[in-house]
Image (cartoon, coloured by chain):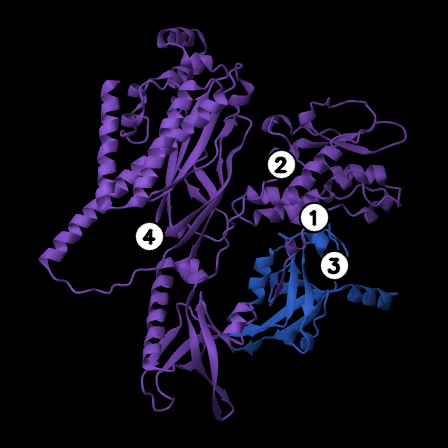
Chain colours: A purple, B blue
């Protein structure tokens, strides 16, 4: 124990000295901050009694360790680079080589979802040991490390969802984002893990085999489980006195520029360990998330000044002095700089993209000299615009800006086609009308008279021409969008929304006059959370009204009780809480074409 | 214009051919669209059935190519150059209309007045 403490202190002293010698106060502050956070987390871990607190403290400890490691390696690299540069300068008086480096940008990741693949034996053959796991993810780009909130996962959940969104700023196009998933088995009775080892092993041998393995795993001291941990260096940092919950690396993946798309995308995940590990979760093997990037060349004005635009009207040529702004994939031409601030539409727009060709000509006899020609391919034809600068220097400034812009666009590739949106506000919460206590596999049973609600409605509502909508449809007035949104968020491909969208269409009641049953449309037996509403038929004499109840109320299936307006107000309330953003006018987009 | 899921759609349509107008580097059609499967259909002022997630024409610029070709506000676009528009997202619809290598778009649109006209002529 003493040795590890001494190693710890030595490491920290070394790093502090290096940071000081680099004269980088920024790093010094960051390292100090993390070290203090780490000490706080250790103390909290030793002192806390509640399981939730211990899990959170262990998570912050792991995050701090990772951050310190990242700072250490960065500081080391910077120090090396400094030494190398000094050597190079001494050996050759190399002139200033102007090599272009692409601009930086912001990278945002949000809506992380990791599907799980539970076996049916987990449900039907469980011997009463109900395992829960605490899971969180670390996202790293260089020195920036973000941790998601911790989520408790058990066999009733089909996915691990992280609601957080993170924005990494000042990232180059050659970035590599490493995503690491950590998990820790949480026993119902936490006191077992903190008991001395002998007692724990005695207890574990008297429990079921898998439960015992898991208990033993969570009690392992730092020395033995160091091999499971990510990087042996974390051994140095973990004080030996820590007996709290221990997280292990479950899976990891690397994401870089080709992984960026403007919509949800699925990436593969590499899992570590196997079934016999205590922290193992049956991952499907992929992670779905939204990764977007905003390079600076798309969000910031590159260059702006007055230029003369040549316009050809018939045979005559005329010159108009316009205020031109280069931004993103366009060159906007305004009549005056005030128009830019007023956010008025530009008088003229020239596209600037990978296919654009730009030439500069000094002292051109045809034009007034110092001209720039911009050629684009438009529907198979070449369209050329000529702009004349007011001086040679200005022309070179513009050319320089264009070259840098092209360099940026070729480095950031697909991110420069269209500006991707990055939401800085907190992500909208997915409306989950059913509480998480509901298990996936127990709710698919749907009562007679058959699982097709539309058929049932046709038969019961048949002669009543006045009834346009079934009473329970009120419940769905607000929800079709939420349900569809819900599904949209859980599917990789936005096209999947089309298949589920159909199920919520109101059946056409005009066809029920003949009394014949409606043609069999899609049933309501969707999977997962959507199936937890069931139609309860009232077998009374008069009223044939359907009541809807969700199963978390624990209601009896064949209850003969009278019509209950039950969860309608509660569900509607939760809908209202979660849905307001969806009803705002901006959600019915109109686009000019 | 409401349809039952899983059943074929029948509608009376009109063919409208719009020649895009070149405005600088852009090819414009002169109308705006609303709707899509990712949009909230209850806010569509032009649809009869408020669960219809189709693409509707929400605005037609005066004197623009769309108005000249006979497109009217409130029309529901069923097809564009052979591509279906009844089950697309808003952005997919926009992309199918604004393809840079197409000068002409041939739309199949439907509107209430067409249905009524056909019904009247049959009775």
Residue A399 drawn at (x, y percent) = 34, 74
* Label 1: which secondary element: loop
What residue would you read off at disc 2? A432
Mark 3 packing: few (<14 Cα in 10 Å), some, or many (20+)?
A: few
Residue under the image location 45 percent in, 48 percent down: A108
Label pair 2/4, CB-CB below 8 angstroms? no
- Judging depth in this view, the residue of A482 and B113 nearest the camera is A482
Label pair 3/4, CB-CB below 8 angstroms? no
Q: Which mark is residue A174?
A: 4
Residue under the image location 86 percent in, 43 percent down: A467
Q: CA distance from mark 1 to mark 2?
A: 25 Å
Left/right of residue A228 with respect to residue A459 in the rendered view:
left
Mark 2 packing: few (<14 Cα in 10 Å), some, or many (20+)?
A: some
* Label 2: which secondary element: loop
Q: Name the chain letter of the residue that bears numbered label 4.
A: A
Residue A567 drawn at (x, y percent) = 73, 31
In this view, A90 is above or below B18: above
Q: Which mark is residue B5?
A: 1
- Labels 2 and 4 in the same subunit: yes
- Labels 3 and 1 in the same subunit: yes
- Judging depth in this view, the residue of A167 and B32 nearest the camera is A167
- Which quarter of the image is occupied by the C terminus of chain A? bottom right
Q: CA distance from mark 2 to mark 4?
A: 38 Å
In this view, A485 is above or below A33: below
Residue A254 drawn at (x, y percent) = 36, 43
| Residue A446 sits in quarter | top right
Label pair 2/3, CB-CB below 8 angstroms? no
* Label 3: which secondary element: loop
Q: Which mark is residue A61?
A: none
In this view, B63 is above or below A367: above
Q: CA distance from mark 1 to mark 4?
A: 47 Å
What residue would you read off at disc 3? B45
């Amino acid at each position: 124990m003493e040795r590890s403490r001494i190693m710890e202190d030595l490491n920290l002293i070394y790093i502090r000295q290096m940071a000081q010698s680099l004269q980088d106060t920024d790093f010094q502050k960051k390292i100090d901050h993390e070290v203090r956070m780490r000490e706080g987390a250790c103390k909290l871990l030793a002192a806390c009694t509640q399981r939730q607190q211990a899990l959170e403290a262990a998570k912050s400890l792991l995050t701090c360790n990772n951050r310190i490691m990242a700072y250490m390696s960065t500081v080391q690299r910077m120090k090396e680079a400094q030494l190398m540069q000094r050597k190079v300068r001494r050996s050759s008086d190399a002139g200033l080589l102007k090599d272009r480096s692409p601009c930086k940008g912001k990278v945002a990741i949000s809506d992380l979802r990791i599907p799980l693949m539970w076996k049916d034996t987990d449900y039907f053959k469980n011997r009463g040991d109900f395992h829960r796991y605490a899971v969180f993810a670390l996202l790293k780009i260089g020195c920036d490390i973000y941790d998601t909130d911790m989520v408790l996962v058990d066999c009733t959940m089909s996915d691990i969802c992280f609601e957080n969104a993170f924005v990494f700023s000042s990232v180059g196009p050659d970035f590599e984002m490493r995503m690491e998933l950590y998990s820790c088995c949480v026993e119902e009775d936490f006191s077992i893990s903190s008991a001395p080892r002998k007692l724990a092993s005695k207890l574990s041998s008297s429990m079921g085999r898998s439960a015992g393995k898991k208990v033993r795993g969570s009690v392992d001291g730092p020395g033995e489980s160091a091999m499971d941990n990510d990087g042996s260096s974390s051994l140095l940092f973990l004080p030996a006195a820590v007996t709290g919950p221990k997280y292990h690396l479950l899976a990891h993946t690397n994401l870089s520029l080709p992984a960026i798309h403007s919509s949800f995308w699925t990436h593969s995940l590499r899992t570590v360990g196997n079934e016999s590990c205590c922290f193992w979760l049956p991952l499907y093997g992929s992670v779905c998330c939204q990764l977007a990037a905003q390079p600076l060349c798309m969000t910031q004005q590159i260059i702006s000044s007055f230029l003369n635009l040549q316009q050809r009207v018939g045979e005559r040529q005329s010159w108009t002095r316009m205020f031109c702004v280069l931004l993103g994939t366009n060159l906007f031409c305004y009549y005056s700089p005030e128009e830019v601030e007023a956010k008025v539409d530009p008088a003229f727009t020239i596209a600037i993209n990978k296919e654009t060709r730009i030439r500069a000509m000094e002292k051109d006899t045809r034009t007034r000299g110092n001209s720039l020609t911009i050629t684009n391919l438009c529907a198979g034809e070449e369209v050329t615009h000529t702009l004349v600068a007011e001086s040679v220097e200005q022309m070179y400034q513009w050319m320089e800006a264009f070259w840098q812009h092209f360099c940026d666009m070729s480095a950031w590739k697909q991110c420069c086609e269209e500006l991707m949106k990055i939401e800085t506000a907190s992500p909208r919460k997915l409306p989950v009308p059913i509480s998480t206590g509901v298990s996936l596999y127990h709710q698919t049973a749907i009562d007679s008279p058959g699982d097709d609600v539309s058929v049932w409605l046709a038969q019961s509502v048949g002669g009543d021409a006045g009834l346009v909508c079934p009473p329970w449809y009120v419940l769905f007035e607000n929800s079709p969008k939420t349900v569809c949104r819900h599904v949209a968020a859980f599917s990789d491909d936005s096209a999947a929304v089309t298949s589920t969208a159909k199920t919520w269409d109101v059946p056409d009641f005009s066809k029920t006059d003949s009394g014949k049953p409606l043609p069999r449309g899609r049933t309501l037996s969707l999977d997962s959370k959507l199936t937890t509403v069931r139609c309860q038929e009232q077998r009374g004499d008069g009223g044939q009204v359907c009541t809807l109840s969700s199963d978390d109320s624990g209601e009896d299936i064949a209850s003969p009780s009278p019509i209950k307006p039950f969860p309608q107000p509660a569900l509607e309330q939760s809908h209202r809480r979660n849905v307001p953003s969806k009803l705002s006018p901006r959600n019915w987009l109109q686009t000019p074409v | 214009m409401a349809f039952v899921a899983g059943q074929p759609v029948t509608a009376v349509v009109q063919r409208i051919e719009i020649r895009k107008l070149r405005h600088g580097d852009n090819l414009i059609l002169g109308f705006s669209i609303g709707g899509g499967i990712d949009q909230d259909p209850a806010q569509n002022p032009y649809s009869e059935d408020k669960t219809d997630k189709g693409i509707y024409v929400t605005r037609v610029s005066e004197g623009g190519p769309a108005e000249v070709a006979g497109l009217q506000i409130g029309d529901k676009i069923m097809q564009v150059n052979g591509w279906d528009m009844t089950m697309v997202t808003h952005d997919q619809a926009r992309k199918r209309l604004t393809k840079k290598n197409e000068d002409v778009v041939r739309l199949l649109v439907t509107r209430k007045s067409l249905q009524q006209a056909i019904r009247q002529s049959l009775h």
